[in-house]
Image: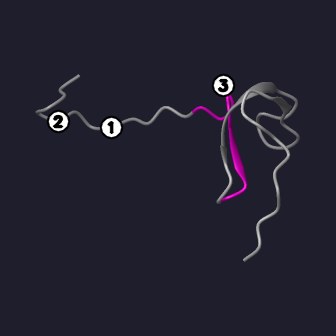
């Protein structure tokens, strides 16, 4: 499978075009070339809830 060249680099400012975060602007933290994705600061941040365990009861 051929991958396209991404012209976005780390620390570039980008604008989200679609989705729930549409029109938000953020800084690129990481470029994942293998999957043609980028990680953008403060965009699509999800908090995961977990059951308490004996190791971490909080």
Dot 3 falls on a residue whose secondary structure is: loop
Residue drawn 85% across and 46% down? 7
**x then y, percent, for residue 27:** 74, 26
Residue drawn 72% across and 77% down? 1
Mark before the other along the chain sequence, 1 or 3: 3
Dot 2 falls on a residue whose secondary structure is: loop
Q: Nearer the viewer, mark 1 or mark 3?
A: 3
**Circles 1 and 2: CB distance less than 8 Å?**
yes
User: Start and end of the magenta stretch?
Assistant: 35-45
Residue drawn 39% across and 35% down? 49
Q: Which numbered marker is on residue 24?
A: none
Question: On the rendered image, what quadrant is the C terminus found in?
Answer: top left
Residue annotated with mark 3: 42
Residue annotated with mark 1: 50
Question: In the shown orientation, is residue 4 left or right of residue 36?
Answer: right
Q: Which numbered marker is on residue 53?
A: 2
The alpha-carbon separation of the residues under discs 1 and 3 comes to: 22 Å
Above/below status of 22 relative to 32: above
**x then y, percent, for residue 24:** 82, 27
Q: How is the image coloured?
A: one colour
Query: Of 54 and 32, which appears nearest the observer?
Result: 32
Q: Residues within 10 Å of mark 1 (few under 14, many from 20)?
A: few
**x then y, percent, for residue 28:** 72, 32
Q: Quadrant of residue 31?
A: top right
């Amino acid at each position: 499978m051929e991958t396209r060249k991404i012209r976005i680099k780390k620390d570039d400012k980008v604008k989200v075009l679609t989705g729930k975060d549409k029109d938000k602007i953020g800084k690129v933290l990481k470029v994942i070339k293998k999957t043609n994705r980028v990680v953008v600061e403060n965009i699509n941040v999800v908090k995961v809830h977990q059951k308490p365990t004996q190791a971490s009861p909080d």
